[in-house]
Image (cartoon, helix red, strand yellow):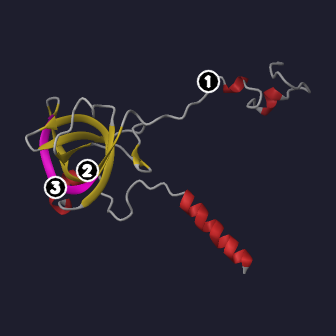
Amino acid sequence: MKGIFVTTLSFLLLTACSSTSTSRPDLPVVSIEQAKTQPDKYKGTKIYWGGTILNVHNFKDYSQIEVLKSPLSGSEPDDQKSGQGRFIIKVSGFIDPAEYKSPSRVTVTGTLQGIQKGKVGSYPYTYPYVIAEKIQFFRGNKAKPIQDPYWWDHPYYRPFPYYYYGGHHGHGYYW
């Protein structure tokens, strides 16, 4: 009986720690392409998207944030991966473009409202349009893991043939 309890508890702890969700489980997964090509089908659908802020435009009663969508790493956009298309977030009130300029990142829980025509440079572009319900900002780029460029010269990280080569301990530079 004790073994079953320990096994069950271990399983629950491991599955809880290993979860890396890329979307909220209570919301459907809708891609940018789906939202662009079938706007009527997905209008009114709640989404959870994120990405890198490209532009902020302010109007009288609201602001629009142009975002390059990227996959989510936990609850944070991972800007180290390639973009998945652009979308627009409509937010009530004023957002200072100087404060939230690129490379700031954002996640939004909101409702798809359809599409909005615009341009990227002189190229015509169709943006999925999201009304924000909950928005979270992240400053700067997502941190990359740091790799020491001299890892091979550290005594604890030398590969086997070089660290212990021909009966010599220590320096692995015996050719």
Q: Position of residue 48 (x, y in %)?
A: 31, 54
Tag 2 residue:
33
The residue lying at 60 percent from left, 61 percent from top is 14
Magenta segment range?
A: 109-119
22 relative to 147 in the view: left or right: left
Picture quadrant of residue 23: bottom left
Outermost residue to the bottom: 1
**Mark 2, other Cα within 10 Å: few <14 / some 14–19 / many ≥20:** some
Tag 3 residue:
113
Question: Of the residues under marks 1 and 3, which one precedes in the sequence?
Answer: 3
Question: Of the residues under marks 2 and 1, which one precedes in the sequence?
Answer: 2
Q: Secondary structure at mark 2?
A: helix
Tag 1 residue:
149
Q: Amino acid at mark 1?
A: Pro
The residue lying at 28 percent from left, 42 percent from top is 85
Looking at the image, residue 109 lies above or below residue 163: below
Q: Nearer the viewer, mark 2 or mark 1?
A: 1
74 relative to 90 in the view: left or right: right
Q: Considering the image in quadrants, where does the C terminus appear?
A: top right
Q: Position of residue 114 (x, y in %)?
A: 15, 54
Q: Amino acid at mark 2?
A: Glu
